[in-house]
Amino acid sequence: VQGLGEELMFRDRTFDVVYSSFIFHELPLKVRLKMIKESRRVLKENGFFGMVDSIQLDDNSTLNWALKQFPKDFHEPFFVDYIKHPMESLLK
């Protein structure tokens, strides 16, 4: 199925597992928040939400310089916003 992560076509509490791989750093904050909300909506009670993505500022402070340089060297229009908004706080 191909579609928008922020507008899933599935019923509430459909899945035991919802997982993403390297997508959140590609999205503006507004869409990230919508995707999290939709993920929770389709996830069964006591289901598992998993994600893997880029590290963020201060996850490893010795790499902060690289995180700040990355969007300058590569076309990553939402990366600066991504590293400034910790996923942990968005998922709470």
Image (cartoon, rainbow, N blue to C red):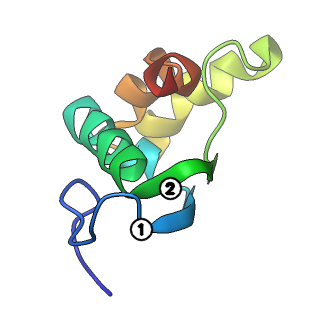
Q: Helix, strand or loop at disc 2?
A: strand
Q: Report how far apart the C-alphas of labels 2 and 1 lie in the structure.
A: 6 Å
Where does the N terminus fall, quadrant-wise?
Answer: bottom left
Q: Residue 2: where, in percent of width, then height? A: 28, 83
Asked if residue 63 is positioned above or below residue 45 in the image, the reply reads above
Q: Which mark is residue 14?
A: 1
Q: Which mark is residue 86?
A: none
Query: For the view shown, which residue lies furthest in the bottom direction?
Result: 1
Residue corresponding to mark 2: 44
Of 74 and 53, which appears nearest the observer? Answer: 53
Q: Helix, strand or loop at disc 1?
A: loop
| Residue 3 seen in the figure | yes
Residue 49 appears left or right of 15: right
* Residue type (three-letter) at the residue carrying disc 2: Lys
| Residue 75 seen in the figure | no
Of 34 and 74, which appears nearest the observer? Answer: 34
Q: Residues within 10 Å of mark 1 (few under 14, many from 20)?
A: some
Query: For the view shown, which residue lies furthest in the front direction?
Result: 45
- Which of the two discs, 2 and 1, labels the residue nearer the N terminus? 1
Could you tell me which residue is drawn at 73 percent across and 19 percent down?
A: 59
Q: Residues within 10 Å of mark 2 (few under 14, many from 20)?
A: some
Asked if residue 77 is positioned above or below residue 90 in the image, the reply reads below
Could you tell me which residue is drawn at 30 percent across and 34 percent down?
A: 33
Q: Are marks 2 and 1 in contact (CB under 8 Å)?
A: yes
Q: Residue 81: where, in percent of width, then height? A: 36, 24
Q: Residue 35: where, in percent of width, then height? A: 32, 47
Could you tell me which residue is drawn at 23 percent across and 53 percent down?
A: 6
Q: Residue 83: where, in percent of width, then height? A: 50, 24
Residue 83 appears left or right of 16: left
| Quarter of the image where one finds residue 76 | top left
* Residue type (three-letter) at the residue carrying disc 1: Thr
